[in-house]
Image: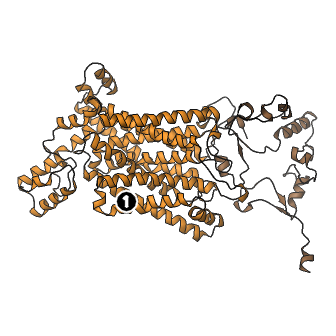
Amino acid sequence: MAYNRCIGTRYCANNCPYKVRRFNWFNYWNDSRFDNYLNNEHTQLVLNPDVTTRFRGVMEKCSMCVQRIQAGKLKAKIEKRPLKDGEIKVACQQTCSANAIVFGNANDPNSEVSKALASERTYYVLEELNVQPGIGYQVKVRNLSELEA
Amino acid sequence: MSSHSESIIREPLITGENITYGQITDDVLRPVENMPGKAWWIGFSVASLGALLWVVAISYTFWFGIGAWGLNKTVGWAWDITGFVWWVGIGHAGTLISAVLLLFRQNWRNSINRSAEAMTIFAVICAATYIGAHMGRPWMAVYSLPLPNQYGSLWVNWNSPLIWDVFAISTYFSVSLVFWYTGLLPDIATIRDRATGLRRRIYSVLSFGWTGSVKTWQRFETVSLILAGISTPLVLSVHTIVSMDFATSLEPGWHTTIFPPYFVAGAIFSGFAMVQTLLLVARKVLGLENYITMFHIESMNKIILLTGSIVGVAYLTELFIAFYSQAEYEQYAFMNRISGPYWWAYWSMMTCNVITPQLFWFKKIRTNIPLAWTLSIVVNIGMWFERFVIIVTSLHRDYIPSSWAMFYPTWVDVSIFIGSIGLFFTMFLLFVRVLPSVAMAEVKLILKSSSEQAKRKLLESGHVEPAEAEFYINSLGKFDSVDQSSYEKV
């Protein structure tokens, strides 16, 4: 998402079959009609300093923590080495207590995420539309044989 | 005198006795050269109040953000793009009348092309305001243009139909404006020649120094034909591209190949309805009954009937294809239109666009001015609902049921729509005051061949088959501007 380039036609949100895009309807951080943490001098501090707050009229969605990806790539570059699998963790993955989220390079066949995606349990939401999402899910394992017995 | 006379069995395009070139100028310029009457002032007051409402509602939106509208994450377009498509569609009739009918030598267009083209321009302006207003950051609208910039390789996305739309609408607007203004030149010169003082100076500048020499007229005819040639494909392309905003997406209910022809037919349908809405009133108020005759009204009603029926066939085809395709999402989208929470919008659309225009099969209704006017309003309403149905009922329930939502307009949505109508009528009423609402030069062109008085001369010459003469006199019965009894002695 190039937020700076967005003119806010909401066309992408309309066309998103997953309806995951979110629009900045108002200037939430600078609009006295909204009483939220964005407007409070102290609570504002919880905002991630690595990411700017988006202006009103701009579309956004999960960026896969692009700031973490950038930081990880730069670190590897400075140390003159390739990026290691698992070196970059997205925020939701880092905080997930059940360890349900795997993130990594799907083009690297040895990465954890590639192995997970190769599993027969993997499926993609609305796969029939062929929009080829980058995110796969895994079906719940059920012990069907017991039911059949 | 022209060397040949038009066949007597064709109905006259100009009625009235003793119509001279000077008389046409006097009649057409009456609203331009005199202070407006009470009807104009009442209309203008109401319209400009509407335009004021538009200014307030648009300013409110710009100040606070698009959140002032009733949209949500599921329904990202509603009254805004409904209004946009509605206005663009309305514009199409003007171009069809001025360009396509010119190429097909339909001389009856000469009386109505000027106001219809003006309507096109004002409708496209209203549409364009919706495009600007619906953007989250309208001050960045320039990003929709492929302008060289210093942001690296940042360019517009040519895969996006919205970019095609930018080109379709801006081309349409500029070509329509040039065509309209070129047609106006000789008429502005006429006003100039009759005016004095400051008015004369203003119209002199506006007439681009029109001299009225043979060479000027020759160039005028050439450039009109060329512009008609350029405008003609636009009649088809503009709404085709507008429909691609929807058709190229994945959205069930939008993703259909029928959209381009269906949108074009709908556009012409709604456009003629709006021409009818405007002209039925304008001819009365401005006293133009002799130029915009019952023949014109009936012809336009026939076009409304034809295009309305095409639109009706398209609706039924959509339903059939949804059933026949066995595509679940598509089938649900159409079931939801018919019987979902927005069923009333679908059935309003069906009633107003498909059922009621069929009344125009009856000549009595086609030639009844109050009824024709009422039906034109009904068509306008129906076509607004069509776009609402396409946009909102497709978006509000698509692939993932957890995201399903409803759209409820806010006062801002409603005010912008009502306001845009006010804006449109404000512009139209001002136009009627300062420019000739009938193309005088073009009407004069057909006076010697197609007017009632020319036909009467032909009748009186006695070289007409009696059966044809009778047919002709009978056909005059529907004209509200002809006294049929005056033909008894002929």
Which quadrant of the view contains residue B40? top left
Query: How packed is label 1: few (under 14 Cα within 10 Å), some, or many (20 or more)?
Result: many
Question: Residue visible at 78% across and 45% down?
Answer: A62
Split into 4 quadrants, where in the image is the N terminus of chain A?
top right
Q: Please, which residue is most extreme toward the bottom here?
A: A149
Q: Nearer the viewer, residue B142 or B401?
A: B401
x, y percent for residue A120: 86, 65
**Chain drawn brown, letter?**
A
Number of disc labels: 1
User: Does residue B281 appear anywhere in the picture?
Assistant: yes
**Chain drawn orange, letter?**
B
x, y percent for residue A79: 94, 35
Find disc 1 in the rendering and name its residue. Answer: B305
* Chain identity of mark 1: B
Task: Look at the picture and state if A24 lies above or below B392.
Answer: above
Which quadrant of the view contains residue A132? bottom right
Q: Nearer the viewer, residue B449 or B113?
A: B113
Task: Look at the picture and state if B131 lies above or below B317.
Answer: above
Q: Could you tell whether A8 is left or right of B368 in the image?
A: right
